[in-house]
Image (cartoon, rainbow, N blue to C red):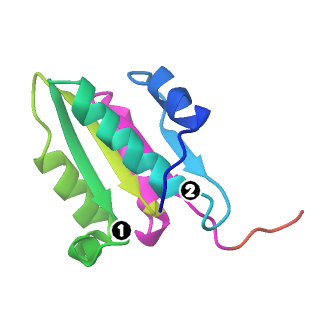
Amino acid sequence: MKLIKRSYLNDLIDVIGTPDIKVITGVRRSGKSKLLEAFFEYVVANFQDANVINIDFNKIEFEELQDYHALNKYITSRYQEGKKNFVIIDEIQMCLKFEKTINGLHSYGKYDIYITWFKRYFTIE
């Protein structure tokens, strides 16, 4: 598969270091994961002081982190003082109650958080 560079990557690069939780969302098969993968590669190539905690819930090795307590423990145990700590999570919706972990990490103010999220069911009000 050929990855087409999009302005979205530049949009992510522009918000590095901001205190916001960066959420990439969209319809299935729209390139969210590929965009996050390209962003991961950019961070690794351009930040020598980066500590990247990268989780891809599409991969079986991360299945045990589908509980928010386990996810939180995994991420906090990999924090490195004195480095830029990036948290990059693909398919966050696969972790039950992920919001508790993400909001908790965000409240520390020491992680730069990027997630992809696909809401399976939408309601119209």
Q: Which percent across, then down, holds residue 45? A: 24, 31
Q: Secondary structure at mark 2?
A: loop
Reading the image, the residue beneath label 2 is: 31
Residue 57 drawn above or below residue 3: below
Name which residue type carries label 2: Gly
Q: How many numbered dots are placed on residues in this image?
A: 2
Q: Residue at x 44, y 22 (%)?
A: 18
Whether residue 106 appears in magenta in the rendering, the answer is yes
Which of the two discs, 1 and 2, labels the residue nearer the N terminus? 2
Image quadrant where one finds the C terminus: bottom right
Q: Residues within 10 Å of mark 1 (few under 14, many from 20)?
A: some
Q: Quadrant of residue 50?
A: top left
Q: Residue at x 49, y 66 (%)?
A: 93
Q: Which percent across, then down, holds residue 109? A: 33, 27
Whether residue 44 appears in magenta in the rendering, the answer is no
Residue range highlighted in magenta: 93-120
Reading the image, the residue beneath label 1 is: 57
Foreground of the two, 38 or 83:
38
